[in-house]
Image: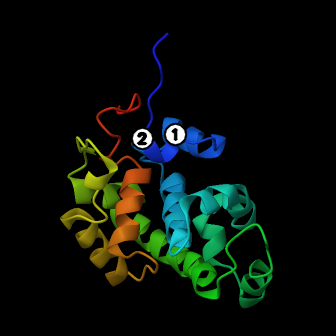
Amino acid sequence: MKKIKRCSWAEGPDALMREYHDNEWGVPSHDDRHLFEMLTLEGAQAGLSWKTILNKRKGYKKAFNNFDAVKISKYSKAKIAELLKDPGIVRNRLKVGSVVSNAAAFLAVQKEFGSFAEYIWQFTGGKTKNNKLRSLKDLPVNTAESDNMSKDLKKRGFRFVGTTICYSFMQATGMVNDHLISCSFKR
């Protein structure tokens, strides 16, 4: 039996991290709901660890109507105040507020482009960029593509979409494949 080799950040005992690495990270997604979910979660991660966010993912799904942008865009100030008391999510006023404003911006992009996927994948020419990395030291925190994505998203009213967040989003949704060459899941 061949030994499974993962990227070193997913080698530890945390089953949730392994599951995410093995089945989601680097897998191309064109599903708008999933893309909005990942943009939300990556924004929530700012200043925190991905492990923290993965542990709160179910809480986010529950708190934010399974990432239904139409419903989220209609949240009232009272609903936002309620969310700020929810221990299942990161209770940061700016981050919670950004989910609501990002939902409205997300819907505007869908209307303009037909889907968010059609819009967002333009930053990689509609294809996954397969990086052939040997070590985590080679992993970039941003690229020209994430810089352009960040700039355009901000122009469209999105928040918590800096270039590093955008690059992490690109990894999470398979726009870039940064599995190490040695990884069994390099796709």
**Would you call the spot at circle 2 few (<14 residues within 10 Å), some (14-19), or many (20 or more)?**
many
Element type at mark 2: loop
Residue at the far bottom in the pictured view:
77
Query: Would residue 93 appear left or right of 133 to someone viewing this image?
Result: right
Residue under the image location 50 percent in, 74 percent down: 46
The image shows residue 14 at horizontal and vertical percentages of: 64, 44
Query: Would residue 8 appear left or right of 128 to someone viewing this image?
Result: right
Q: Determine whether 165 is above or below 127 in the image.
A: below
Q: Determine whether 2 is above or below 31 in the image.
A: above
Q: Determine whether 132 is above or below 60 in the image.
A: above
Name the disc covering residue 11, or none. 1
Question: Is there any visible trace of residue 114 in the rendered image?
Answer: no
Q: For the residue marked with disc 2, what is the amino acid?
A: Cys
Q: Nearer the viewer, residue 121 or 147?
A: 147
The residue pinned by badge 2 equals: 7
Residue under the image location 74 percent in, 82 percent down: 84
Q: Nearer the viewer, residue 155 or 56?
A: 56
Q: Verify CB contact (< 8 Å) between mark 2 and mark 1.
A: yes
Name the disc covering residue 140, or none. none
Q: Nearer the viewer, residue 58 or 70?
A: 58
Q: For the residue marked with disc 1, what is the amino acid?
A: Glu
Residue under the image location 55 percent in, 43 percent down: 20
**Would you call the spot at circle 1 few (<14 residues within 10 Å), some (14-19), or many (20 or more)?**
some
Element type at mark 1: loop
Quadrant of the frame with the C terminus: top left
Count of residue discs: 2
Query: Would residue 140 appear left or right of 100 to someone viewing this image?
Result: left
The image shows residue 76 at horizontal and vertical percentages of: 71, 85
Question: Is there any visible trace of residue 121 in the rendered image?
Answer: yes
Q: CA distance from mark 2 to mark 1?
A: 7 Å
The image shows residue 180 at horizontal and vertical percentages of: 32, 39
The image shows residue 41 at horizontal and vertical percentages of: 55, 64
